[in-house]
């Protein structure tokens, strides 16, 4: 009887051990085969804008590396916070990617959302870009001072197109407000694409566009570039003066990069999946077609991942959050969210 019990226990032990081994093997196989289905990519801005263009160049190369399609969808609204919330609400399993710009780093101080990039993991920060103030080709504004002087003479009457509170055109308006004490009548559109259409149709007097979105229109003569919102001119549009060049008092405000585009996943996504995604998007970033696009459109290639990407975003957040706060455009103090002064 004792021998039978021992035999039974040995059999059960072997079966149990086998189940553990099989289970571990299955889990390992699942990790190794990610992705096993197509991946959803949510673009936080509308078609035709900078975020959209960069996303649609990166995704096809990355999906070849991953072996599954990345199905891209534009989900606009609330300065990209609708898209950010949507991805945040999904499982952290690597099947929902957020293609976005710098905006979540300002959501808290602007009262748009409690989310920030602390709630996401950067897969890659692809490029850094700059903004250029543009007007229609036949605008009476020949220079930036023309625009500023008219806005001072007619407070709240000059229509400045923005892409929502916290977007780069909004930031441009705040920089000019802080530097010149000028107030525009801001009119909101869903990204660079709709802003371009509005400016072509003269629904607005001026706007700030990503240089990548504005370059062809400036070169074709459809738009007149008044100022690059930076301390140095941009090689893509070398004839357009830099704000810091024209007005040295702005130089300290313009030390942080204008904006950035990247790919993100929800925090809590397994590290092995994050690594696979990072490796795939690094290949996409290094692709000759993408690098050529960045150069032609006045963007600075970044290719940052991990801690480097996080440090870059924190520095940007510090500079821009306090700039908005000092200009009177914030609903909350950056201090409340532990954002240090630059």
Image: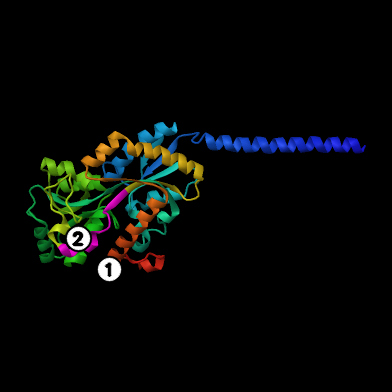
Q: CA distance from mark 2 to mark 1?
A: 20 Å
Q: Which mark is residue 326?
A: 1
**Where residue 210 sits: x, y (%)?**
23, 48
Q: Is residue 224 left or right of residue 107?
A: left
**Looking at the image, which is closer to me, 86 or 286?**
286
Residue visible at 66% across and 35% down in the picture: 22
If the image is split into quadrants, where does the N terminus sit? top right
The 10 Å Cα crowd at callout 2, few under 14, some 14 to 19, many 20 or more, is some
If the image is split into quadrants, where does the C terminus sit? bottom left
Mark with earlier residue (2, 1)? 2
**Where residue 114 sits: x, y (%)?**
42, 59
Q: Secondary structure at mark 1?
A: helix
Q: Is residue 105 left or right of residue 220?
A: right
Residue holding disc 2: 185
Q: Specify whether residue 25 is painted magenta.
A: no
**Where residue 119 sits: x, y (%)?**
44, 54
Q: Is 115 drawn above or below residue 301 in the view shown?
A: below
**Looking at the image, which is closer to me, 330 or 76?**
330
Q: Nearer the viewer, mark 2 or mark 1?
A: 1
Is residue 55 visible in this depiction of the protein? yes
Magenta stretch, residue numbers: 248-260
Is residue 183 visible in this depiction of the protein? no
The 10 Å Cα crowd at callout 1, few under 14, some 14 to 19, many 20 or more, is few
Residue visible at 43% across and 56% down in the picture: 118
Q: Is residue 24 left or right of residue 315?
A: right
């Amino acid at each position: 009887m004792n021998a039978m019990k021992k035999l039974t226990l040995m059999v059960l032990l072997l079966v149990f051990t086998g189940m553990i081994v099989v289970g571990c093997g299955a889990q390992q196989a699942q990790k190794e085969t990610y992705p096993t289905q197509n991946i959803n990519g949510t673009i936080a801005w509308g078609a035709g804008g900078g975020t959209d263009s960069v996303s649609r160049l990166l995704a096809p190369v990355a999906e070849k590396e991953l072996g599954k399609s990345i199905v891209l969808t534009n989900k606009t609204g609330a300065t990209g916070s609708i898209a950010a919330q949507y991805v945040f609400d999904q499982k952290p399993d690597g099947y929902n990617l957020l293609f976005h710009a710098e905006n979540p780093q300002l959501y808290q101080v602007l009262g748009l959302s409690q989310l920030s990039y602390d709630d996401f993991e950067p897969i890659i920060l692809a490029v850094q870009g700059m903004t250029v103030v543009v007007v229609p080709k036949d605008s009476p504004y020949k220079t930036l001072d023309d625009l500023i002087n008219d806005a001072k003479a007619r407070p709240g009457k000059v229509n400045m197109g923005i892409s929502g509170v916290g977007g780069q055109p909004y930031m441009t308006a705040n920089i000019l407000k802080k530097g010149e004490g000028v107030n525009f009548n801001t009119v909101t559109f869903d990204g660079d694409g709709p802003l371009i259409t509005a400016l072509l149709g003269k629904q607005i007097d001026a706007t700030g566009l990503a240089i990548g979105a504005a370059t062809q229109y400036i070169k074709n003569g459809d738009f007149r570039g008044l100022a690059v919102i930076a301390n140095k001119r941009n090689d893509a549009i070398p004839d357009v003066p830099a704000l810091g060049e024209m007005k040295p008092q702005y130089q300290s405000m313009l030390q942080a990069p204008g904006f950035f585009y990247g790919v993100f996943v929800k925090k809590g996504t397994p590290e092995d999946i994050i690594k696979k995604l990072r490796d795939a998007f690094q290949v996409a970033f290094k692709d000759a077609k993408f690098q050529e696009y960045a150069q032609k459109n006045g963007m600075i290639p970044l290719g940052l991942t991990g801690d480097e990407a996080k440090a870059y975003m924190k520095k940007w957040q510090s500079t821009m959050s306090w700039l908005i706060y000092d200009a009177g455009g914030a609903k909350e103090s950056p201090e409340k969210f532990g954002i240090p002064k630059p």
